[in-house]
Amino acid sequence: MKIKKQLLFLLITILSLNCYSQITFEKGYYINNSNQKVDCLIKNIDWRKNPTEFEYKLSDKTERKALTINSVKEFGIYNISKYIRDSVNIDRSRTSLNDLSNDKHPIFKKEQLFLKELVGGKANLYLYEDINLKRFFYNKDSFNIKQLIHKGYITSENKIKQNNSFKYQLWNDLRCENITMKEIGKIDYEKNELVNFFVKYNVCNNTEPINYEEKQTKHLFNLTLRPGINYSSLVVENPPSGYYDTDFGSKLGFRFGVEFELIMPFNKNKWAIIFEPTYQFYKSEPEIRIYPNSTVLLRKRYPKVEYKSIELPLGIRQYFFLNNNSKIFINGSFIMDIPINSKIVFENGRELEINSALNLAFGIGYKHNDKYNLELRYQLSRNSFEKESNWSSDYHAISLIFGYTIF
């Protein structure tokens, strides 16, 4: 119980920390209103919405400061992202089905925005994101930036249709011998498809495109070998009789898992989905003295348990970056357990098959160089007799897990 409280306190403490180490200051620059370029360190928070300001430091030893859209024409993090300021006409028409209008035409409003550059070259592609809003912009040969028009609307017959004028814009303004009208007609108003089109257009015009999306593509899947040690305990109860009540005690055992980790491509890769098929083993033969029923005779019995299973934990992990080479993480998982020829044998010869229910597990760990990791994990109570109405059990485990990422 003491260990459980300590681990719970540790998890809550980490979750509640305003942990500056999650986000790092990376080499970048900004250009002020006087067209002066200043190299600096910019706080990279992997903006989900286009920012209106950002934090920077002139060096590791100086204080952090903030700059706003009013004083900066452009800023970027080298090899990662670039934002430019411009006054553009933007259509903020709502996109949810319940809010669609009957007007197929965009309703433009002039706004000063930081636009995120996705592709640079002879023709440039930009992105603006806000809550429930995504708009793409473009320009060619440094002419004015315009929005690529895409709008859903409801017709007089109460049908939902799309104004896909962006396809005509692409055909009229970005025509090239290697790009056909049929090809443009198949393009959806999606980031990957538009990025591919602008890359192809620039290549077609003998211009080497700068693809920021390609630069940010990271290895988003990890395969990790995870051997470890379990410190497990099992208590069995049979309330109708009490005869079979047994504390099998805490035992050390070996476990081996293979973890599949899918890194989420947002929020600076701090979130992941994890799945870790694991073999675990628990064995105990305790000596217990009891007073069966109300007799006064002392009786000795020797029950034994062999519990082998494949655990299937599926969960979510969050990383907290310490520096470029190390990070800590916390994770929580649902565990489905599949016993393998597992049973309890009592001294009178009665056998009880183990069939487990779902339970939860929480862990905290450290990862170095995206290669080596160490995790301390605690499993909440698991009932090992889900199909037995008169039986209950309390199985839980604390695990020390070593990891080596092979892919």
Image (tube, rainbow, N blue to C red):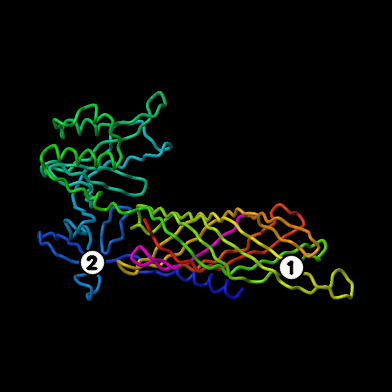
Mark 1 neighbour density, 10 Å: few (under 14) some (14–19) many (20 or more): many
Q: Residue at x 14, y 59 (%)?
A: 31
Q: Which residue is mark 2?
A: 56
Residue range in magenta is 358-374
| Quarter in which the C terminus is drawn | bottom left
Q: Main secondary structure of the magenta part?
A: strand
When the figure is inspected, residue 32 is found, relative to residue 141, above or below; the finding is below
Q: Residues within 10 Å of mark 2 (few under 14, many from 20)?
A: many
Q: Is residue 363 magenta?
A: yes
Q: Which mark is residue 398?
A: none
Figure check: 13 above or below 348: below
Horizontal and vertical percent position of residue 135: 28, 43
Q: Secondary structure at mark 1?
A: strand
Residue 87, position in %: x, y?
Answer: 19, 48
Residue 379 covered by magenta stretch: no
Give the residue drawn at x 51%, y 61%: 256
Where is residue 200 shown, x and y percent of the image?
19, 38
User: Camera-side residue: 249 or 65?
Assistant: 249
Q: Name the residue at 40% across, 39% down.
A: 96
Q: Quadrant of residue 243?
A: bottom right
Q: Nearer the viewer, mark 2 or mark 1?
A: 1
Using residue 188 as the reference point, say whether residue 363 is left or right of it.
Answer: right
Q: Amino acid at mark 1?
A: Thr
Residue at numbered disc 1: 246
